[in-house]
Image (cartoon, grey):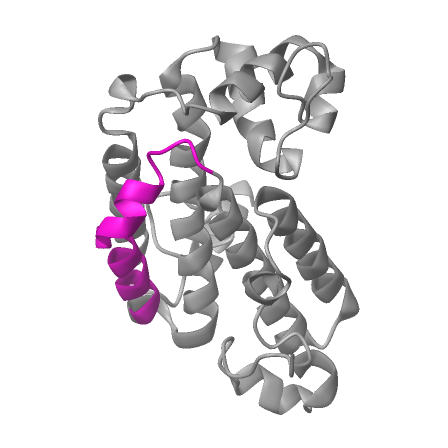
Amino acid sequence: MATNVLDATAATGTGRRAPWKAPVGEPPYARPALLFLTMLAAVFYAWGITHSQYHTFYADAARSMTGSWKAFFYGSFDPANSITLDKSPGFLWPQALSARLLGFHPWTLTLPQVLEGVASMLVLYRLVHRWAGTHAALLAATAFLVTPVAVGLFRTSVEDPAFTLCLLLAAEATQRAARAGRLRPLLLAGVWVGAAFQRRCWRPGPSCPPSPWCTWSRPRSRCAAASPTSAWPPW
């Protein structure tokens, strides 16, 4: 009987799948290709970070934030918490945490941007895969990977990588809300928009995820078929 149970489990495919094997219904090369792109992104973005340089202004603030949780919360430029930054402190939190854990070095301030770049590519793959399938998702991830400005962006100590990741997460959550007609993913998209605002305090326009009104203004069947960038809010 035990043999029959094992045979039935193997036949139905309910066993644990190896991480390098594609899910059922996808081409067998889909998951290996994604893993290859992920490793390639890590190499591209991390190449030469040991030769990184301190930012002339924000590196001092990150160092102050590593020595005091009060300075960490308020984004103080000096350890005495007498001067704050000209931006919201959220964009320096990953760098301050990295320096607090690994020591204050130029490469520890660059490492969070490397990880955010790899995560951005994976979120973009998931978003496009849900919308247009495996091949389109692989093409989008490849295009994102080989874009020169992206390679240069994710190996610097500026706030744009975290801003990019938060907006992609907001778009992905908005897409899930539009497809399922649920409120919780839409609220999560708002959380990611707020996190993006913390990373780069711009006007509200660039921080808006695409099609947030699709969940409520369109029938669910049309939302599921709509592009995640089909419409923007009227403002």
Choose between 224 and 169: the one closer to the eye: 169
Q: Is residue 41 left or right of residue 201?
A: left
Residue 154 on the magenta segment: yes
User: Residue at left 65%, top 44%?
Assistant: 198
Choose between 6 and 96: the one closer to the eye: 96
Q: Is residue 180 left or right of residue 165?
A: right
**Residue 165, horizontal then vertical, whole percent:** 50, 49
**Residue 146, horizontal then vertical, whole percent:** 21, 52
How many discs mark residues in the rendered view? 0
Of the 4 image quadrants, the one containing the C terminus is bottom right
Of the 4 image quadrants, the one containing the N terminus is top right
Q: Which residues are magenta?
A: 136-158
Choose between 228 and 9: the one closer to the eye: 228
Residue 74 falls in image quadrant: top right
User: Residue at left 63%, top 17%?
Assistant: 65
User: Residue at left 49%, top 77%?
Assistant: 229
Q: Is residue 81 above or below residue 18?
A: above
- Asked if residue 78 shows in the view, the reply is yes
Residue 145 on the magenta segment: yes
Choose between 107 and 62: the one closer to the eye: 62
- Asked if residue 28 shows in the view, the reply is no
**Residue 16, horizontal then vertical, whole percent:** 48, 44
**Residue 179, horizontal then vertical, whole percent:** 62, 76
Dominant secondary-structure state across the stretch colored magenta: helix
Q: Is residue 177 left or right of residue 232?
A: right
User: Residue at left 62%, top 68%?
Assistant: 174
Residue 105 falls in image quadrant: top left
Q: Is residue 99 above or below residue 187?
A: above
